[in-house]
Amino acid sequence: MRFLRKNKASKSILVISDIHLGAGVLVNGKRNYLEDFHFDKELVDFLDYYSTGDYHNKEVELIINGDLFDLLAVPFVNFFDDEFWSEDAALCKLDMIIKAHPEVLEALNRFVSVKNKKLVYIIGNHDAEFVFESLRQRFYSLFDEKIKSRVEVVLNNNGEYSPVGGVVLKHGHEYELAHHFHPEDSIVESDEGKKYFLPPWGSYFVTRVINKFKEERDHVNAVRPIKKFLINGFIYDTFFTLRFLFSVVFYFIMVRSIYLFKQEKSFKKMIKHCMSELELFKDYETMTQDFFKECPEVQCLIVGHTHDPSIRSFSDGKIFINTGTWTRMFHLDFGKNSYGEQLSFAQVDVIDEEKKSYDINLNVWKGRSNLPFEEFS
């Protein structure tokens, strides 16, 4: 009977996350090994589908729950070291991404142009430089003047957004100290008046370690779970895995441990702080139980960040969803899609908003037609 309920839905809320638009497959004639997004046509098809046909006159709110733009993965920019985190560099990186994926951004504009359509963009940790007002204005400039009021960029300290009562979204990086940043306190200004973003150490780690190893193994950031990645790496790719692990440990000691020891002035406190910062990709499903206890009025929590799509219904009827990613992933756990992509998204159909009656699902986009080819990767 699910299709009957959907026909009665007054509004549909779509949630996608972790698109990771990069600077394109080729940058200045060179192969860009940092580009993770290869599904422009599929995303355009998705956006067009939910703004035409049965959804043309229907109210649809599209929420991009973090990491639409991957500003940490833009190579060959004319900025070095700390200048990479300047406002000028951030604008340059954003423009490179916009030029690399024009079809996607045109489809977003086309989607919002249809009546009863709205776009909400929540900032993640890979597009954290949207703390700069100039980047947000550059994003708004991609949309026609008459429809800009239908586009909203969410930037607050806890990263939460609630499209309807009882449904809460957050990107998910807020749970990890390594990736947490304050939208206002993370901006500093030099004596010359230039603005800089103070990134969390996790962002430094991505640009200084992960990006360098992706040139050799482009899957290095796309394997889950991380423990099994290391175990398999020691067996089948020993030398690379040893170099990667050594770089990770060395980087953490030099960048975090020494700094924290000077800050805490206690070896015990330093170790405790380090352990808390190393808790990456936490078990969000377990954490949501505490979230629901603190916020009993919430029926559904939707996050992203870990790139691991999942849906969990609890005995009290509350729902946890991780929307996954639109990039290729490799899963070493049995029972999961071991290789390839799952273009997953959450869909919340509003049956009765006053009664908080919703039909909530995690779906996988398969497209309206089979494309004749796809890019080899």
Image (tube, helix red, strand yellow):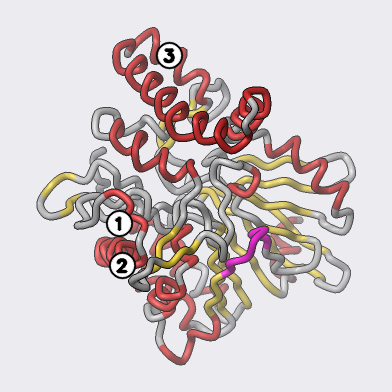
Q: The C terminus lies in which quarter of the figure?
A: top left
Residue indicated by mark 3: 232
Residue indicated by mark 2: 88
User: How far across and down, in percent of the image, does residue 66 sit?
Assistant: 52, 57
Residue indicated by mark 1: 83
User: How far across and down, in percent of the image, does residue 28 sit?
Assistant: 12, 55
Amino acid type for the residue under numbered disc 1? Glu
Q: Nearer the viewer, residue 359 or 126?
A: 126
The answer to whether residue 40 is left or right of residue 156 is: left
Cα separation between marks 1 and 2: 8 Å
Stretch of the chain drawn in magenta = 154-160
What crowding class fits label 3: few (fewer than 14 Cα within 10 Å), some (14-19), or many (20 or more)?
some
Name the chief secondary structure element in magenta.
loop
Q: Is residue 165 above or below residue 363?
A: below
Cα separation between marks 3 and 2: 41 Å
Q: Are marks 1 and 2 in contact (CB under 8 Å)?
A: yes
Amino acid type for the residue under numbered disc 2? Asp
At a point 80% along the width and 61% down the height, the residue shown is: 166
Q: Is residue 67 visible?
A: yes
Q: Quadrant of residue 105?
A: bottom left
Q: Earlier in the sequence, mark 1 or mark 2?
A: 1
Q: Nearer the viewer, mark 1 or mark 2?
A: 1
At a point 80% along the width and 67% down the height, the residue shown is: 165
Q: Nearer the viewer, residue 45 or 142?
A: 142
Q: Are marks 3 and 2 in contact (CB under 8 Å)?
A: no
